Amino acid sequence: MSPLVPLGDVQATILDAVVRLDAVEVPLGDALGAVLAEGVVAPEPVPPFANTAMDGYALRAADTAGASPDTPVRLRVVDDLAAGRAPDVAVGPGEAIRIMTGAPMPDGADAIAMVERTRRDGDGTGEGVFVEVEVPVGRHVRPAGGDLTAGQSVFEPGTRLRAGHVGVLASVGATTVRVFRRPRVGVLSTGDELVESGPLAMGQIRDSNRPMMLALVREAGLEPIDLGVARDDEDRIVALLEDAFDRCDAVLTSGGVSVGDYDFVKAALDRFGALEWRQVAIKPAKPLAFGVVRGVPVFGLPGNPVSSLVSFELFARPALFQMAGHADRFRPEVLATAAHDFTRRPDGKLHLDRVLVRWHGDGYVAGSTGDQSSNVLSATAPANGLALLPDGDGVAAGEAVRVMLLDSPPDH
Ligand code: AMP
Ligand code: MG
């Protein structure tokens, strides 16, 4: 029996062996979740011209001196300006232009009176408006370049693009961006007992790992590639892997890596050499195969669905994030209060219990999601965290427990 290797050592070995992918130019519409390979500089100011932040009247601030609801100032309305139109009339002394949010400031005007502080005198343009407030120069005017000036640095390299970033990039006219290529991640299930659909014969179960892994890859913002289900046949698995190494940047397999008589993934991967077989000092997800074959990192994850998921989180996800250029490869960890006793026995392993973490007004509270057996996936699905229970006798109710967050905690 090989010795148990601490979690951190295995993670470090993997991250040392995995390299970032090349930079590519992608359409902005495909950039969500990707990491910028180079910084972006605004080629033009945002907004491109001074414009109004309010519906109202563009006027000369000096004309509103002393204006109040009791002593309004009457201005002559000389034009009506909607957003999208270029002004062709200037505002002279004693004049105003009716203007809508986003429309350019007309020449001569230096302030906006919001419509709520005005009263129409007559209907339509060419009529007058009573302004009931004194407005200073610049009131409700958004200057050109007030958001970003031309030449200003917008985002640094290494920025992970969220929806807001995509919006900003669009605002400076970027139609493509240079990002690190998203890893294409092949997912292969193995086992004679697995079926994809239809009725189950005695001894058969449904393949849950592959759909789950494909979803985990997609959720991480990466590109999943479905490699199907392989029978427990060493030659067949080798053939499938050969094909996968040509098409994928990383490969995840599940099952067949423990010490059973039919663990053909282990045998198949060994034929490619350079694979490391680990017994990690954790529960669940103790067995792990890892190696880089023809430049492609391969993760042989254990077959039990809960173990597969935990193994993905601890080993595959950080490595895939590193390949995708992310600076933050690991999930965040928080300290939570144990909602109940987390009992365990010393066994030389870190236990990772599936928990639901909630925010309770002044701190996080973590409670088990149920049966912690490595085959009971239904009790894992609702979890938004993995409680990290160090080797020992567990954590008592009310004590602090470290939790790796898989999702944001609800605040109730
Ligand atoms: P193995 O690592 O191949 O010995 O599998 C360990 C356990 O996980 C066995 O009970 C398998 O039936 C189960 N298992 C393996 N692969 C899958 C899968 N893709 N979906 C659901 N269960 C699986
Ligand atoms: Mg198997």
Image (tube, rainbow, N blue to C red):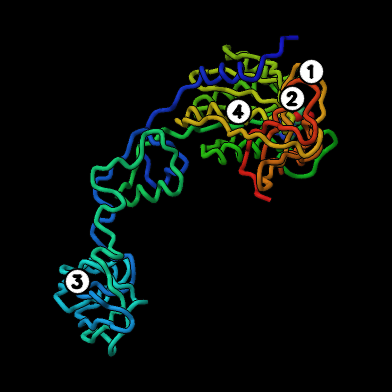
Which residue in the structure is indicated by mark 2? 283
Considering depth in this image, is 232 or 59 the residue closer to the camera? 59
Mark 3 within 8 Å of ligand 1, using the beta carbon: no
Residue 150 visible in the shown view: yes
Do the residues under discs 1 and 3 have CB atoms within 8 angstroms? no
Q: Secondary structure at mark 3?
A: helix
Query: Is the residue under label 2 in contact with that under label 1 (CB below 8 Å)?
Result: yes
Horizontal side of 68 relative to 340 (left or right) equals left
Q: Looking at mark 2, is its residue's CB closer than 8 Å to ligand 1?
A: no
Look at discs 4 and 2 and give the one toward the viewer: 2
Q: Residue furthest bottom?
A: 122
Hey, what amino acid is under mark 4?
Leu
Instruction: Tell me the crowding category of disc 3: few under 14, some 14 to 19, or many 20 or more residues within 10 angstroms, Cα based.
Output: some
Residue 359 percent location from the top left of the image: 66, 45
Q: Which mark is residue 252?
A: 4
Q: Amino acid at mark 2?
A: Lys
Nearest to the eye among marks 1 and 2: give it.
Answer: 1
- Residue 347 marker: 1
Residue 234 place in picture, x, y as percent: 67, 19
Which of the image's four quarters has the N terminus?
A: top right
Q: Is residue 101 above or below residue 116?
A: above
